């Protein structure tokens, strides 16, 4: 569900949801909005216009045009002329879920390699070119996708497309053994910083390999294992790229101060000659089945014990996803939640929360608490179970559901305030749903959820169900674990997947132009200053404002003369004007 925005998150050079298996029970029908037109005509080049979406009235929709190139690349263009900027996103539908036992971490590793230069872009020049143009850039990898993106002035659009196309079609000859070794050391260091040597850093790894069967692509983390990185070589990495990084497994999304026709023309020029990659089929795996509670624990260099209780739920896109989000928010999503009341407010835990996460192949409902030093986690587990029992007795109120809907919709609307937010959302929808216009669908699902839906999903996925229960304990305090470890990973029945790596060949595009030449910049963009209006009330209060119809929100700021300059009139109240005082609730 877009509330969590997990498809935008990942492990990256900084540090993501997806089509689910069809379900029979659907709480709300989701026909395509009437704003979608589906033309089939081709452009003057080779791209085919698949659909065009426009806004009608005040509906919450991101207008766009969608094209497909003959090599399978999907191009989504969203014109937004509010600022002289353009955001370019290339999302490859490959993450750690396309890896296999013994070769983990490849998707994230390749994210690093994609910034190390290509045939026509020198080493580290991608960063230098974008930043020199006044832009920003990055990339990220998660279980299900890898994306690369940059925000640049609109006159740098062609340069951004030139850069992205070069690493899609002309990367592998630039991947040297030396670069491979440097980036392998970088990734190993990243794992040490973010996982092995970070407090509670290995908790999610323990959960993953305990919750999912051996060989399931979610049974390891995106960062991978050090031993897999050590045994891999540069040819393993190149084969991974050849298998998954073809244009037919990618979406190019461009938004901002551009014209769709111009973007398509440039996409045809720079991406069109790149050869289609091997076909990529959708993955579909059954949900994990727990026959009993699985207790696992490990010692860490921490002072406060931590407990996690994880129930398997549903993948992203499942009809029950929104109701599960609401359930998680009510049980443990804030200071009005049951978890906060029973653990934090009651001073039984330092921190505590519950949340629901969904990815392409599976979902998880998590209850997490950090307890006080020396306190056994069996008591924390008892509080979790008491909280769930209380939820069963008290049920769900209309007010709680309404609050969830309002806050979720507000989060969604605010995420669309920037061109980067719009582009990222369109890219994710196309990658995981095959439909960039999924926003109205998700809004209808959100608005249709009821307290009966919330109670139903609790009964279906949580009540009386088994969970993975992880204890993270200070060194030498294993006796504080919530329960005795009772689960060992079994390799029984595992069959390695055949992803089709045999016979892959690197075939470069044949061009009619010189890719060595960086495109020239367009005319310098001009910032359009918004029109300002001013007024004044009879009591002297002055008003100043501007109108913006990009998103349906109103922002208000009241400024009162004060500050340290006026404190000198009463030195006994010095410091009273500081904006960093206690929060008012």
Image (tube, rainbow, N blue to C red):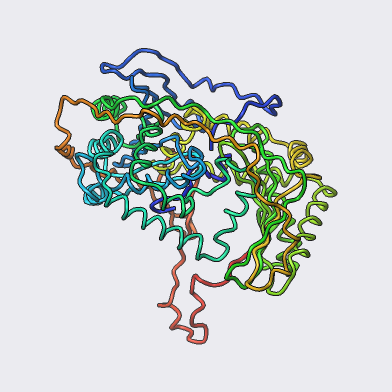
Q: Is residue 305 above or below residue 521?
A: below
Identity of the residue drawn at 27% across and 52% down? 178
Quadrant where the C terminus is found in the figure: bottom right
Judged from this view, the residue extending furthest toward the right is: 393
Total numbered labels = 0
Check the image and name the residue furthest to the top.
41
State the image coordinates of residue 334 (x, y, percent, origin top left): 66, 56
Residue reaching furthest bottom?
572
Residue 409 position, x and y percent, is: 58, 41
Q: Is residue 208 left or right of residue 231?
A: right
Point 76% across, 57% down: residue: 384
Place of residue 6 in the rendered image (x, y in percent of width and height, measured from the top left): 53, 45
The N terminus, quarter of image = top right
Residue drawn 68% across the image and 35% down it: 320
Residue 237 appears in which quarter of the rendering? top left
Q: Where does residue 51 sit, x and y in percent of width and height? A: 42, 20
Left or right of 409 on screen, residue 120: left
| 512 to the left or right of 89 | left
């Amino acid at each position: 569900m877009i509330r969590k925005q997990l498809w935008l998150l990942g492990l990256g050079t900084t540090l993501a949801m997806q089509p689910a298996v069809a379900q029979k029970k659907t709480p709300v029908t989701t026909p395509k909005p009437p704003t979608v037109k589906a033309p089939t005509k081709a452009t003057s080049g080779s791209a085919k216009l698949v659909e065009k979406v426009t806004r009608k009235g005040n509906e919450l929709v991101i207008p766009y045009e969608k094209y497909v190139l003959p090599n399978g690349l999907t191009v989504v263009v969203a014109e937004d002329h509010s600022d002289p900027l353009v955001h370019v996103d290339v999302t490859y539908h490959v993450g750690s879920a396309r890896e296999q036992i013994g070769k983990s971490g490849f998707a994230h590793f390749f994210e690093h390699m994609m910034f190390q230069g290509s045939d026509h872009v020198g080493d580290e020049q991608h960063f230098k070119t974008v930043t020199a143009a006044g832009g920003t850039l990055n990339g990220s990898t998660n279980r299900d996708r890898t994306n690369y993106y940059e925000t640049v002035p609109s006159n740098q659009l062609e340069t951004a497309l030139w850069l992205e196309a070069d690493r899609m079609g002309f990367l592998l000859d630039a991947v040297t053994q030396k670069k491979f070794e440097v980036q392998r050391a970088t990734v190993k260091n990243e794992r040490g910083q973010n996982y092995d040597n970070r407090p509670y850093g290995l908790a999610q790894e323990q959960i993953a390999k305990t919750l999912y069967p051996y060989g399931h692509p979610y049974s390891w983390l995106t960062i991978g294992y050090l031993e897999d990185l050590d045994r891999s070589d540069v040819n393993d990495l190149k084969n991974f790229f050849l298998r998954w990084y073809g244009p037919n497994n990618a979406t190019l999304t461009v938004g901002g101060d551009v014209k769709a026709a111009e973007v398509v023309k440039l996409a045809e020029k720079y991406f069109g000659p790149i050869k289609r990659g091997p076909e990529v089929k959708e993955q579909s795996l059954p949900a994990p089945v727990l026959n009993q509670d699985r207790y696992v624990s490990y010692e860490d260099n921490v002072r406060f014990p931590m407990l996690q209780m994880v129930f398997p739920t549903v993948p992203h896109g499942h009809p029950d996803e929104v109701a599960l989000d609401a359930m998680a928010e009510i049980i443990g999503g804030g200071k009005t939640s049951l978890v906060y009341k029973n653990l934090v407010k009651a001073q039984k835990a330092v921190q505590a929360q519950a949340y629901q996460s969904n990815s392409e192949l599976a979902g998880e409902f998590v209850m997490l608490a950090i307890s006080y030093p020396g306190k056994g986690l069996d008591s924390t587990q008892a509080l979790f179970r008491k909280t769930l029992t209380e939820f069963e007795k008290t049920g769900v109120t209309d007010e709680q559901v309404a609050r969830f809907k309002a806050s979720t919709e507000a989060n969604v609307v605010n995420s669309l305030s920037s061109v980067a937010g719009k582009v990222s959302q369109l890219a994710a929808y196309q990658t995981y749903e095959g439909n960039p216009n999924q926003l109205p669908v998700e809004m209808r699902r959100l608005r249709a959820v009821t307290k009966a839906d919330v109670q139903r999903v609790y009964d279906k996925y949580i009540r009386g169900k088994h969970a993975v229960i992880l204890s993270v304990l200070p060194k030498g305090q294993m006796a504080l674990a919530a329960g005795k470890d009772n689960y060992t990973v079994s390799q029984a029945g595992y069959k390695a997947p055949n992803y089709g790596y045999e016979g892959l060949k690197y075939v470069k595009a044949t061009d009619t132009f010189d890719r060595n030449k960086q495109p020239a910049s367009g005319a310098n963009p001009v910032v359009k200053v918004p029109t300002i209006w001013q007024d004044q009330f009879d009591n002297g209060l002055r008003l100043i404002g501007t109108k913006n119809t990009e998103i349906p929100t109103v922002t208000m700021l009241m400024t009162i003369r004060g500050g340290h300059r006026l404190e000198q009139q009463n030195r006994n109240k010095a410091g009273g004007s500081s904006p960093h005082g206690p929060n008012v609730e």
